[in-house]
Amino acid sequence: MKAVVRLISIVALLSVTLAACAAPTPQVVQQTVVVTQVVKETSQVLVTQIVKETQQVLVTPVPPQGGTIVIRAGTGDGGDGLTPHQQIIQNFEDKNPNVIVQLEPVSGRDYYARLLTQLAAKAAPDIMQVGDDAVPSFVSKNAFLPLDDLIKSSGFDTSIYLPGLLDPGKINGVQYLLPKDYSPLAVYYNKKLFDAAHLDYPKEGWTWDDLLAAAQKLTLKDASGKVGQGGIQLPGPWTTGFEYWVAAAGGSLISSDGKHFVGYMDSDKVLRAVQFYADLYNKYQVAPQPADLNAFGGGNSEFASGKAAMMLFGRWPQSGFLKNPNITLGVAAPPKDAVRANVLFWGGFGIASSSKDPGTTFKYLSFVSGEPGAQVWKDWALPAVTSVAKSSGMAADPIEGVWIGELSHLAPRAYTFTPYWNETADPALSKLLQSVIIDPKADVKAMLAQAAQDAQAALDKLAK
């Protein structure tokens, strides 16, 4: 059995010359990460490999005066997404002149791998940003410090947050992360196409049957039967988005103790969700087939081009839709079935277990995740803090208020019950969804039973 141990050292090559009296303004640094890979079998070293990787990092140089504390803040954001981080850091440093916050962005798919490598070398950033489904895995690796004592000793009031936004940062009732940004799901709809069809817009309390009826009326075909306008653009085999359908049907993909997929993933309620979803594609043909099964959300563009009347997705593309001349935008809550439900997509900040100064780090964490940070995040994402959501007018806005209101209808996502979700049920569910979407003759019940068995076998092997 081979194991790989990765150790890192960091050499910073400044792209600018810093004078001894330089002001603490951000500088661009080319950071070379030297990764030593030691491949072992039992105690015998077989291979030692040195790899150099170079990345750009924004670094605030430490001023020469004594007593300055440097906090490193890691993020997977990049490009324009770094702007709110930089503004929040500037605001914090203005109020805390003895603290420098050094922003360390690493964009790309290897972000989590880099964090884990840095943690192993005890060289991780003090603040680490991760997404919701990575929380159980990172916590199981002791990557984050528990925050409860720091919250209590600092007097930080966690009741400032909107409903449900602390939960993704908890494991077994212990708070490890505080919220950065989030999105539930909603149905975008194009008022132009609804008006042309003389249809009422979706209303609170609408159902799956209402969705289907509207989508059928909004699906337009030419004389040859070719669809020119789809009723609704769906996100393909996107497993996390599909959890909404399961929750709305009243089902669960996993037992509450995190040990069983069989009897849950293959239940009648989940079968109802999978069958209805597949039927929207194949039986009723109101949803265009995914443009790319491997692309996030199916890779479709029909809604953006004015060729689909509705779209189920998160808030991420909304700013583009508001500027799109093909669309007069409306946003509605997802329809209910047995249950009025939604699911949450969330990112948060925690303190690395290797942090040398948890107290000062928490001071910044409570700032970037609290009301001061939310005042900046609101211009880029939905604010997590209730007072900011209200004072900004977003909570009462006819579009933004829909997203915020959905926080009162959240169902727990399956990853919250097991740290092995990504390795077990997620691939099985993805394979199932791909099959039932592209194959009109798929035996959904039999395939669902097989997916549950595959997920269970993978879980039993990992949980030993």
Image (spheres, rainbow, N blue to C red):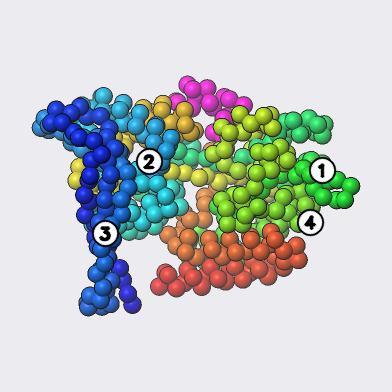
Q: Which mark is residue 304?
A: none
Q: Is residue 447 left or right of residue 454?
A: right
Q: CA distance from mark 1 to mark 2?
A: 46 Å
- Say which amino acid is labelled 4: Lys
Task: State how far apart marks 4 and 3 are (Cα).
Answer: 53 Å
**Residue 207 screen position, x and y as percent:** 72, 43
Q: Is residue 125 above or below residue 449?
A: above
Q: Which one is in front in this view, the residue at disc 3 or the one at disc 2?
A: 3
The CA distance from mark 4 to mark 2 is: 43 Å
Q: What residue lies at 71% left-to-right and 44% top-to-bottom? A: 232
Q: Residue 35, labelled with which disc?
A: 3
Which residue type does callout 1 highlight?
Answer: Leu
Q: How many marks?
A: 4
Residue 110: image quadrant is: bottom left
- Between circles 4 and 2, the one closer to the viewer is 4
Q: Quadrant of the C terminus?
A: bottom left
Residue assigned mark 2: 178
Mark 3: secondary structure: strand
Residue with the mark numbered 1 = 220
Q: Is residue 340 visible?
A: no
Q: In the picture provided, is 89 more to the left or to the right than 378?
A: left
| 423 part of magenta stretch | no
Q: Which label's residue is closer to the chain start, 1 or 2?
A: 2
Q: Mark 3 vs mark 2: which is more N-terminal? A: 3
The residue segment tinted magenta is: 388-405
The image position of residue 62, as x and y in percent, is: 18, 34
Badge 4 marks a residue whose secondary structure is loop
Amino acid type at image mark 2: Leu
Please report whichever mark, 1 or 3, sits nearer to the chain's N-terminal start. Answer: 3
Q: 22 or 385: nearer the eye?
A: 22
Mark 4 = which residue? 283
Q: CA distance from mark 1 to mark 4?
A: 15 Å
